Amino acid sequence: MLLVQQTNPSNEIAISTTTFSEGQNALRLLALKSDDVLSKMDIEKEGFKAFAGDLVVLEADFYLNSIENIENLLLIDLECCSCWDPTVNDNQCPGVRLMMSGGNDFLAIERGKISATNLQQTSVQFPRNEWVTVRWELTLANTDTGVNKLSINGNEVINDNGMNMPNATIFRDVFAQNGIDFTLQEPVFYERIQVGATANPTMEDIELFVDNFSIKIN
């Protein structure tokens, strides 16, 4: 099932027949800069389950129509919402994400929502105003046995071991620091993917195009 996430009514989503990677069209997304509400404009896919031990391969072509600083722009989110403790308000849908970092446009694997440090690189900047193929491979684990690979236009920029799923003990300890009893709901599995401008905290309006998105779970 595909859904649309749009937090600003002035954000835009449409089918482009003039800018595409293959075929005859692509998805055009416009995410305006954030104000008091975080700006988001993306599509969501639900209805799958990816468990620890599974290999998840995500691929998409992106065209970023901007030369501005895009630090912290998020392009892909892989999340579990059902794992959140139902007794704790404001479900954060923990997971891992692809985010621009390194001062501007070095694509990284963001792990803050699972209470881990980000996996970063500064070897390849994200090209602008041209089609870019991103491939993200994860062998899922809630320990450091997880495998995280990221390629840009066929060039591998990240290949690191590290947790890429929520860990019940870590979540319990983190929330306990704020006096909250938190129990991660098990079994834990990823069930939602978001693609596009999944969050635009930048000071710029971001126009991007997405084509050839796929997710494979083995």
Image (tube, helix red, strand yellow):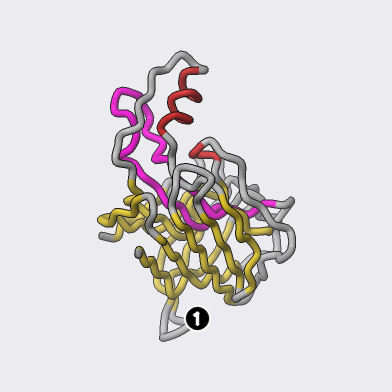
Q: Which residue is mark 1?
A: 21
Q: Which residue sits at x=63%, y=68%? A: 156
Q: Position of residue 126 (x, y in %)?
A: 66, 66
Q: Residue furthest bottom?
A: 23
Above/below status of 184 relative to 71: above
Quadrant holding the N terminus: bottom left
Residue neighbourhood size for the residue with mark 1, other residues' Cα within 10 Å, grouped as few (<14), some (14–19), many (≥20): some
Q: Residue furthest front?
A: 145
Residue 105 belongs to the span the image colors magenta? no
**Which stretch appears magenta?**
74-101
Above/below status of 84 relative to 121: above
Q: Residue 31: in sight, yes or no?
A: no
Q: Which residue sits at x=49%, y=39%? A: 114
Q: Nearer the viewer, residue 7 or 114?
A: 114
Q: Amino acid at mark 1?
A: Ser
Q: Position of residue 166 (x, y in %)?
A: 43, 39
Q: Position of residue 131 (x, y in %)?
A: 58, 76
Res. 95 image quadrant: top left
Q: Which residue sits at x=74%, y=51%? A: 103
Q: Position of residue 159 (x, y in %)?
A: 61, 60
Q: Is 52 on the left-hand or right-hand side of 33?
A: left
SS of the residue at dot 1? loop
Above/below status of 64 relative to 202: below
Quadrant holding the C terminus: bottom left
Task: Please count the marks in the image.
Answer: 1
Q: Nearer the viewer, residue 10 or 79?
A: 79
Residue 79 belongs to the span the image colors magenta? yes
